[in-house]
């Protein structure tokens, strides 16, 4: 058999061993090509890529916005007296978003909120709050100089009752001006009993002065415990 630069034949089994073949039409090829590395391939159009890409790490990616970051989450399936979230980084995050739901242990009690600083509740009578509930007719609740925030009216304790809420939590950081911050906004639904569902929306402010900078908060019931529930907290960067 004659040999050329483009076709060198192995002396043992007759296979072609030289890869320096150019200008060969794909219609002239048959069989299965051997697996090769694509490490040095460049400028391949995305439209020509098929199949599933392998899992890769995004640790070194840059230029991707990460202003909305998951901070923490939690869940429980046996009764707890309260749920506290502490050690919030208020220098990095201006606002916090929390999705929350729970079922109380006892019928006819309300969900409360307090700010915390270094693990200690703010119990001074400096909370101003209001919320409205709607169920065909609307009812408004309001308080000034209270020692906590009331988030709901009385709710039921059956398996699908309790409440489902979304919170915007705005602690006053050292970057805030004057009395800005230490505010809370919420909306959601709760069930008074099996047939009475209530829509609720409210806001609250804690007048702790210009130097009170909380880094946590607590939710608890007016009486009894919280039987089961879960939550997730996200931070919004400054």
Image: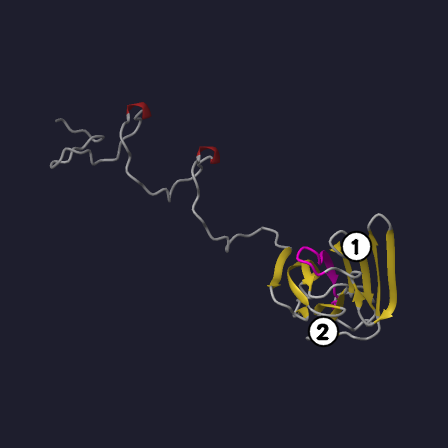
In three-dimensional space, the C-alpha distance between marks 2 and 1, rounded to whole angstroms, equals 27 Å
- Mark 1 sits on what residue? 200
Closer to the camera in the image, 152 or 23: 152
Magenta segment boundaries in residue numbering: 157-174
The vertical placement of 63 against 184, above or below, is above
Query: How far from the left and from the top, in percent, is residue 134?
Result: 83, 51
Magenta run includes residue 32: no
Closer to the camera in the image, 78 or 8: 78
Query: How far from the left and from the top, in percent, is residue 204?
Result: 81, 63
Crowd tier of the residue under label 2, counting other residues whose Cα lies within 10 Å: few below 14, some 14–19, many 20 or above: some
Residue at x 62%, y 57% (from the top left corner) = 69
The vertical placement of 42 against 64, above or below, is above
**Circles 2 and 1: CB atoms closer than 8 Å:** no
Magenta run includes residue 169: yes
Residue at x 65%, y 65% (from the top left corner) = 227
Closer to the camera in the image, 7 or 83: 83
Q: In this view, does 152 lie to the left or right of 102?
A: right
Quadrant the N terminus occupies: top left
Dot 1: what SS? Answer: strand
Query: How far from the left and from the top, in percent, is residue 205?
Result: 82, 65
Dot 2: what SS? Answer: strand
Q: Residue 117 carries which label?
A: 2
Residue at x 82%, y 72% (from the top left corner) = 147
Query: How far from the left and from the top, in percent, is residue 68?
Result: 64, 55
């Amino acid at each position: 058999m004659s040999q050329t630069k483009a076709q060198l034949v192995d002396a043992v089994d007759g296979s072609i061993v030289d890869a320096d073949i150019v200008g060969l039409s794909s219609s002239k090829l048959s069989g299965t090509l051997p697996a090769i590395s694509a490490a040095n391939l460049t400028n391949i159009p995305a439209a020509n890529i098929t199949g599933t890409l392998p899992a890769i790490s995004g640790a070194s990616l840059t230029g991707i916005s990460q202003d909305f970051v998951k901070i923490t989450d939690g869940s429980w399936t046996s009764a707890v007296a309260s749920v506290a979230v502490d050690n919030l980084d208020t220098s990095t995050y201006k606002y916090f978003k929390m999705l929350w739901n729970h079922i109380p242990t006892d019928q006819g009690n309300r969900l409360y909120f307090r700010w915390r600083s270094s693990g200690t509740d703010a119990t001074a009578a400096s909370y101003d709050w209001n919320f409205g509930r709607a169920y065909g007719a609307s009812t408004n609740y309001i308080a000034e100089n209270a020692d906590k925030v009331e988030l709901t009216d009385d709710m039921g304790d059956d398996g699908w009752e309790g409440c489902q809420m979304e919170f915007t939590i705005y602690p006053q950081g050292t970057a805030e001006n004057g009395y800005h911050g230490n505010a809370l906004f919420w909306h959601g639904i709760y069930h008074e009993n099996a047939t009475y569902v209530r829509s609720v929306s409210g806001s609250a402010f804690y007048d702790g002065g210009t130097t009170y900078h909380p880094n946590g908060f607590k939710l608890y019931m007016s009486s009894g415990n919280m039987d089961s529930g879960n939550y997730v907290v996200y931070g919004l960067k400054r």
